[in-house]
Amino acid sequence: MVRMDYVCKVGTPAGEVVEQTFSATDESALRTDLEQKGYYLFSVRRGLGLRELGLRTPKVATERLLIFAQELAALLKVRDKVKSGMALSEAFKAEGKLYPPILSASLIAGERGGNMESVLRRLVQYLRLTNALRKKAIAASVYPIMLFLMMGTLLAVMMLKVIPQFQQFYAGFDLDLPLITRVLMGVAVGLQHNVIFVVLALAAAFVAFRLWLRREGSAVIIDRLLLSVPYFGSLMRMYATSQLARTLSALLQGGLPLLNALEVAANSIGNRAMAAAVAGATHQIREGRSLTAALESTGMVDTLTLEMVKVGEQTGALGDMLNSVADFYDEEMETSMAKVLSLVEPVLLVFMAVIVAAMLLAFYLPLFEAISAVEQHTGM
């Protein structure tokens, strides 16, 4: 829907009277939006923006149109399947990996319990919370990644440009260079002369690693190793626990049986090692063991989570307890990420400074020694 600009004279929540331009679909929507924000509207008039003058016509971006067309086609397929007698949950499940497993599982719960609207509302809340958590994790990792890229770029420039120039300079002198200087020169010259082969080798190694990850069990091995990394491993464990608890809570509160809910929740965990462990716990649930005992046997779930799950099972409020677990770990992860980043940033900066200083020292030290020798020889 086309949005229009309105010039409004409003009273702010702070008690000031100001004139500002707001955008809304119509005047009624504008008034509602301003009231919700705590503004008091004195007067309003249409703005004369480029859109109103006919100089700018709003268009849908090609990428958004492509996504819309794909989603519409998928939904029309689902509609046709429902019309042919298939259940809504089965229709979405038949689309394969296009939709996450939690969607079809939630729809099954809604169909069984006859409370589809409330189940979908819980699903919306779940997706909103998990998406917000994912965005926070991505935002927190941007700066360290930028530092790593800067460090890699700096090393590449030093090895491919700076060091070869020093090598040409020292080639004209009969100097006994230190071992570290000779090693760096050899590596730099080798990289400069074989840069294409090095790039191809790195690309081949990357492709081989990706193919190895596709083998069954390979990703589990990598993720298990990542969980053992200091600091970062604990963050990954907290994130995986939050995913498990949040998904399981949403499905249980929607009315899905524990066994089915746990199977879907296992698939929602990003860490494959923990996902495999939780999936294995479903066999113990089938044998009649409690959720607490099944999760404890995996060795992947910490004591606090197990205690809260146990209380939830005993009180019949497992869904609420799992929600509390997810909320707790979301907050803990945010605090821990801030602590880790406060350590990572200075460590990376110091590491970059030490590397650059060591490389410069390795190449300037022989020069200083040569100058000193010349001065001594001249003085004699």
Image (cartoon, grey):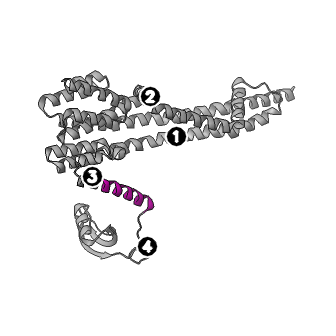
Q: Which residue is mark 4?
A: 56
Q: Is residue 160 visible?
A: yes
The dominant secondary structure in magenta is helix
At 63% across and 33% down in the image, what residue appears?
357
Q: Is residue 316 left or right of residue 165?
A: left
Q: Earlier in the sequence, mark 4 or mark 2?
A: 4
Q: Residue at x 43, y 30 (%)?
A: 219
Characterize the local packing of mark 3: few (<14), some (14-19) or many (20 or more) Cα atoms within 10 angstroms: some
- Camera-side mark, 1 or 4: 4
- Upstream in the sequence, badge 1 or badge 4? 4
Instruction: Read off the magenta span.
Output: 61-78
How far apart, in angstroms, are the residues tagged by discs 1 and 3?
A: 50 Å
Task: Write down the residue under mark 3.
Answer: 81
Q: Earlier in the sequence, mark 2 or mark 1?
A: 1
Image position of 28 with respect to 346: above or below: below
Q: Earlier in the sequence, mark 2 or mark 3?
A: 3
